[in-house]
Amino acid sequence: MPLYDCMFLFKPHIKKEAAMDLVVRVGKHVYRRNGVVTDVKSLGNVQLGYGIKKLDGRYYQGLLMQMSMMATPHINKELHYLNKEDRLLRWLLVKQRNTNTNFGLDFFGDEGRLELSRFSQLGKLEDEDEDDDDDDDEYEVNEEENQVN
């Protein structure tokens, strides 16, 4: 099962108990679908970059919470009931990258590292050839022209 982060942005006047009630309800939904909630964080009140308009007004602040979970890939479709939740300004579900994914040189392995070392040697050979320009005579300045009479 992939790992997901679910971000909740609550209206600023909502108490933490009411926010936690919604987070617990989502956690129970995940648990009923054989998922596991791994972490819940409250990031506190945040100032928004722009106002979010709702039926009861425009909001420039919100309470931000994050819930990490392992769930089935269909969890995004199953959580769309949150769109009708009155306590939320916004919610977002983000799938985390696979932690077993290799990046950089680890991706290539030992064979790939040998290939990459060949490229670096080719670059050094090309840099040495650049200094052997024959047109340096054009840029020489006669000493006679530099002397002041």
Image (cartoon, helix red, strand yellow):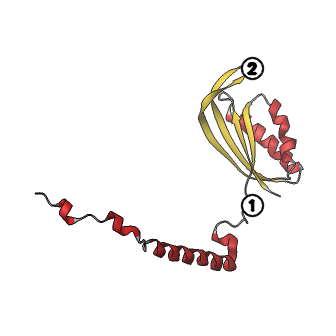
Quick one: quadrant of the N terminus? bottom right
Where residue 36 appears, x then y in whole percent?
Answer: 81, 54
Residue depicted at 13% across the width and 57% down the height: 148
**Cα distance, mark 1 to mark 2?**
39 Å
Tag 2: amino acid: Leu
Give residue 94's position: percent from left, percent from top: 74, 47
Judged by depth in the image, the label closer to the viewer, 1 or 2, is 1
CB within 8 Å, label 1 to label 2: no
- Residue reaching furthest to the right: 33
Density class for disc 2 (Cα within 10 Å; few <14, some 14-19, many ≥20) is: few
Find residue 98 and name its label: 1
Element at label 2: loop
**Which residue is situated farthest in the left direction here?**
149
Kind of residue sitting beneath label 1: Asn
Q: Viewed as shown, does residue 91 lie left or right of 50?
A: right
In the rendered structure, find residue 76 and report the number of the disc placed on it. Answer: none
Residue 92, picture quadrant: top right
- Residue drawn at the location 87% of the way across and 48% of the way down: 74
Provide the secondary structure element on which disc 1 rests. Answer: loop
User: Residue 55: x, y in percent?
Assistant: 75, 20
Q: Residue 19, image x and y in percent?
A: 72, 36
Residue drawn where x is 80% and y is 56% of the image:
2
- The residue at which mark 2 appears reads as 55
For the C terminus, which image quadrant?
A: bottom left
Residue at 68% over, 41% down: 65
For label 1, count other residues whose C-alpha is less than 10 Å away and answer few (under 14), some (14-19) or many (20+).
few
- Which of the pair 19/74 is nearer the observer? 74
Q: Nearer the viewer, residue 147 or 4?
A: 147
